[in-house]
Amino acid sequence: MGRPLVLTVAGSDPTGGAGLELDLAVVTHLGGLGMACATALTTQDTTGVHGVHPLSGPLIGERLGVLLDDLRPDAIKVGMLASAEQVAAVEKALARVPRDVPLVVDPVLVASSGRELLDEEGRTLLMRGLALGARVITPNLAEARCLSGGSRSASAEGTADALLAKGVRAVLVTGGDEGGGEVVDYLADGPRRRTWREARIPGASPHGTGCALSTAIAVLLAMGRSLEDAVDFATNFVREGIRNARAIGRRRHGRPRLQWDLRLDSKEK
């Protein structure tokens, strides 16, 4: 198999630390070929999101339509969607993709600044369409509770079961945004269950961990790996990025950026 072709549909982050730009970097780092469709242009720096400017649903649909008429992705990752119109446009465009192409949906509902990115109508439409067609959805615990309609104190296990009951095929509830000294990620894939528990890496939380995780999963699925293997690899990959993260902004208290070692081939040509 050659290098897998992975499509990301997500918002653009001009810092390169998250969103579309980070997704493409992850695809390339893991040996894939990336293609992309932006859903929104954002105004942001390393301290947070200061403005969101969504693209229209028809424009997103047009761009995806032309792209998918020419190229068949081996996996698709859908990240930030900013409106019900966008959700509908993406769902309609992706309907032309064969059902065996794995889809990873990372439901980005709220920016790190606390700004709402997808309203209730959009969330409802997402859960009735794209989420049901996904091989896996990758919400953090707060997002999973919101999408499942559960209480703010619902456990990852209970929330995952509630999402499966709504028709979702598999859900990875991530725990990186929760407090405490341990990060717990919980995968429910039909009847299969697995929990990852790791000590939290000290220091400020880097930007873009959810984007990197979902994109890495998509790349590994494109390579033919099982979902559990893909999640296992992706969680370790993100932890490596956190360990190597560094601050890049001039403002104080900016979030560090994920970083991975790049080792160029030193063999003689």
Image: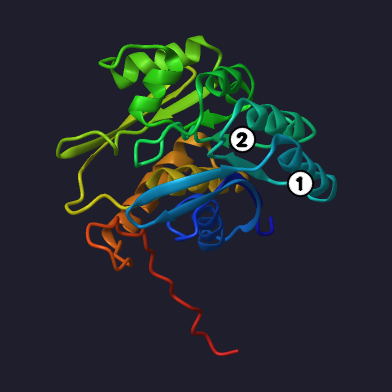
- The residue nearer to you, when weighing 190 against 6, is 6
Q: CA distance from mark 1 to mark 2?
A: 18 Å
Q: Quadrant of residue 78?
A: top right
Left or right: residue 53 compared with residue 238: right
Q: Secondary structure at mark 2?
A: strand
160 horizontally vs 106: left or right: left
Residue at figure coordinates x 60%, y 48% from the top left: 223
- The secondary structure type at the circle numbered 1 is helix
Which badge, 1 or 2, is on the more N-terminal residue? Answer: 1
- Is disc 1 surrounded by few (<14), some (14 to 19) or many (20+) residues within 10 Å? some
Of the pair 67 and 86, the residue shown nearer to us = 86
* Nearest to the observer: residue 20 or residue 224: 20
Mark 2 crowdedness (10 Å alpha carbons): few <14, some 14-19, many ≥20 = many
Asked if residue 137 is positioned above or below residue 215 in the image, the reply reads: above
Type of the residue with mark 1: Arg
Front-most of residues 261 and 44: 44
The image quadrant of residue 263 is bottom left
Q: Position of residue 165 (x, y in %)?
A: 49, 9
Q: What amino acid type should be assigned to the residue bearing mark 2?
A: Leu
Q: Position of residue 80 (x, y in %)?
A: 53, 39
Query: Compared with residue 41, is residue 258 higher up or lower down, i.e. above or below?
Result: below
Q: Residue 16, labelled with which disc?
A: none
**Residue 108, image x and y in percent?**
47, 35
Q: Which residue is mark 2?
A: 103
| 1 or 2: mark nearer the eye | 1
- Reading the image, the residue beneath label 1 is 63
Image position of 69 (left or right of 8) = right
Above or below, comparing residue 77 to residue 138 in the picture: below
Whether residue 194 appears in this view of the structure is no
